């Protein structure tokens, strides 16, 4: 079914069931359940067992989706035509796929249910000089299967020096991507692009690799991630990850300018390492470089992390970890700057250590937090590796724990 510009598709419930759309035929709508046009509205439908995406939009403006259930989308495990140059392989279809390379788009997904989509649950792909805004509210994204590199619940991929994406996830639940590439929320920026993501009053549950990951692939791209009043738990590796990837800069004249900023308030981050596969590196929150190109030095840029009034507990390896410890095997160390502020948090019972530091240029102001005991953070619960001894780490003025 191909939508006409400015039209609405509204299903009428009968006997408690939403009307159902399916499409197992590649020759109709390229196998998609619904193909969107500009200013489309889709309400109160069930889409199931589609050959490709349940809902697909290409360079569409002002899209509203409400009360739509999508089950078992992309049964063929097929791919879209658009590429994302800095990620391996082709981009797959999924439950809801929005591609924007022109002008501006605003997408709203509310009160919907996505289950067992192959590849992507919901993905926004923004490139060139386009600007995308996608809001996901009161929506559940659960289960699904991996296609190539991709196994993600909600994703925002942005590339291009003038490209920008704004992702908001609120009052939603995401879990159940159980491959070793499984991620509940994935934000990726390349080519000098900018991404801003906000997760509020939401739940990120069990997943094979990361709960929420923010990955800057190339300098001078930037990601700002805000997490408020949420629960992030049970990821196989990291519950929250911010990483600069060591690909060549998009602008050779602006190397070492990749930036990641993460702010967390009033949230609970716990039990990283719950899914088997990454137990030895499971951290509740990790910031550090990723080695996509093994023969190149780690990416250099800046990380900023602010955590207030939150709980960080029960990780398999570490509560908070800064820097890539695997670089030590090559005789390298992190060159990036880390600026960290922790206030009013409860941080305890995390695997080998509450805090691990592998980054020499880390400045961590961790005053006025609870570390699980009145005297504060014991030295035995901190791991500072190699030349990271030059980092600044202040845990004075410990506070009593607040039960919440």
Image (spheres, grey):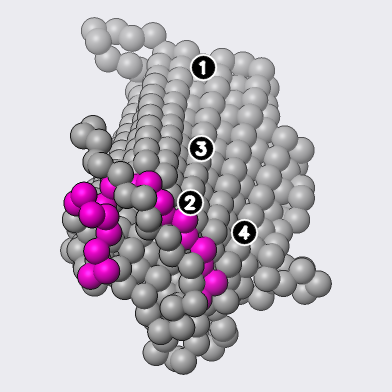
Marks 2 and 4: which is nearer the front? 2
- Give the foreground label among 3 and 2: 2
Tell me which numbered mark, 1 or 2, is placed earlier along the sequence. Answer: 1
Q: Which residue does the numbered mark 1 point to in the structure image? A: 9
Q: Which residue is mark 4?
A: 259
> Where residue 282 sits in the image (x, y, percent)?
28, 64
Q: Earlier in the sequence, mark 2 or mark 4?
A: 4
Q: Are marks 3 and 2 in contact (CB under 8 Å)?
A: no
Camera-side residue of 73 and 225: 225
In the structure shown, which secondary structural element does the residue marked by tag 4 occupy? strand
Task: Tell me if 133 is positioned left or right of 175 in this view.
Answer: right
Residue situated in front as seen by the camera: 216 or 262: 262
Q: Report x, y in % for residue 49.
A: 33, 38
Position of 180 with respect to 42 (left or right) is left
Sequence order check: which comes first, mark 4 or mark 3?
Answer: 3
Measure how far apart labels 2 and 4 are at the Cα level.
Answer: 16 Å
- Which disc, if any, is residue 341? 2
Q: Which residue does the image show at 28% across and 47% down from the upper left?
A: 370
Q: How crowded is the residue under tag 2: few (<14 C-alpha within 10 Å), some, or many (20+)?
A: some
| Membership of 376 in magenta stretch | yes
Marks 4 and 3, how far apart at CA: 17 Å
Mark 1 vs mark 2, foreground winner is: 2
User: Where in the figure is residue 298, as x and y percent of width and height?
Assistant: 55, 78
Q: CA distance from mark 3 to mark 2?
A: 19 Å
Question: Can residue 246 be seen by looking at this rendering?
Answer: no
Q: What residue range appears in magenta?
A: 360-380
Please tell me whether mark 1 sits on a helix, a strand or a loop: strand
Above or below — where is 365 with respect to 47? Answer: below
What is the spatial separation of the Cα atoms under label 3 and label 1, in whole angstroms? 29 Å
- The C terminus appears in which quarter of the rendering? top left
Q: Residues within 10 Å of mark 4 (few under 14, many from 20)?
A: many
């Amino acid at each position: 079914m191909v939508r006409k510009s400015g039209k609405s598709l509204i299903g009428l419930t009968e006997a408690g069931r939403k009307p159902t759309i399916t499409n197992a035929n590649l020759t109709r709508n390229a196998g998609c359940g619904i193909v969107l046009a500009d200013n489309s509205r889709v309400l109160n439908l069930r889409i199931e067992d589609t050959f490709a995406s349940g809902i697909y939009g290409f360079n569409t403006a002002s899209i509203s989706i409400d009360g739509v259930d999508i089950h078992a989308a992309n049964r063929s495990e097929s791919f879209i035509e658009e590429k994302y140059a800095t990620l391996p392989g082709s981009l797959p279809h999924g439950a809801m796929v929005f591609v924007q390379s022109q002008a501006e788009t605003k997408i709203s997904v509310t009160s919907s249910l996505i289950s067992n989509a192959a590849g992507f649950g919901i993905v926004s792909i923004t490139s060139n000089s386009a600007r995308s805004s996608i809001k996901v509210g009161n929506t559940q994204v659960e289960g699904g299967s991996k296609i190539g590199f991709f196994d993600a619940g909600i994703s925002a991929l942005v590339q291009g020096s003038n490209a920008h994406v704004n992702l908001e996830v609120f009052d939603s639940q995401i879990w159940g991507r159980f491959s070793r590439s499984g991620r509940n929320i994935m934000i990726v920026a390349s080519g000098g692009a900018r991404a801003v993501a906000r997760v509020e009053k939401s739940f990120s549950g069990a997943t094979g690799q990361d709960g929420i990951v923010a990955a800057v692939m190339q300098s001078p791209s930037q990601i700002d991630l805000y997490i408020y009043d949420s629960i992030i738990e049970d990821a196989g590796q990291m519950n929250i990850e911010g990483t600069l990837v060591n690909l060549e800069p998009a602008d050779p004249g602006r190397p070492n300018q990749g930036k990641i900023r993460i702010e967390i308030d009033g949230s609970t981050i716990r039990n990283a390492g719950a899914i088997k596969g990454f137990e030895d590196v499971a951290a509740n929150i990790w910031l550090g470089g990723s080695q996509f190109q093994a023969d190149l030095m780690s990416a250099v840029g800046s990380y900023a992390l602010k955590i207030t009034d939150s709980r960080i507990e029960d990780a398999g390896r570490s509560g908070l970890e800064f820097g890539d410890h695997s670089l030590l095997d090559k005789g390298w160390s992190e060159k990036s700057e880390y600026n960290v502020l922790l206030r009013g948090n409860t941080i305890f019972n995390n695997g080998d250590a509450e805090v691990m530091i592998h980054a020499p240029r880390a400045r961590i102001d961790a005053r006025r937090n609870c570390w699980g005991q009145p005297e504060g953070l014991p030295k035995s619960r901190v791991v500072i590796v190699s030349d990271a001894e030059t980092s600044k780490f202040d845990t004075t003025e410990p506070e009593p724990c607040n039960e919440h």
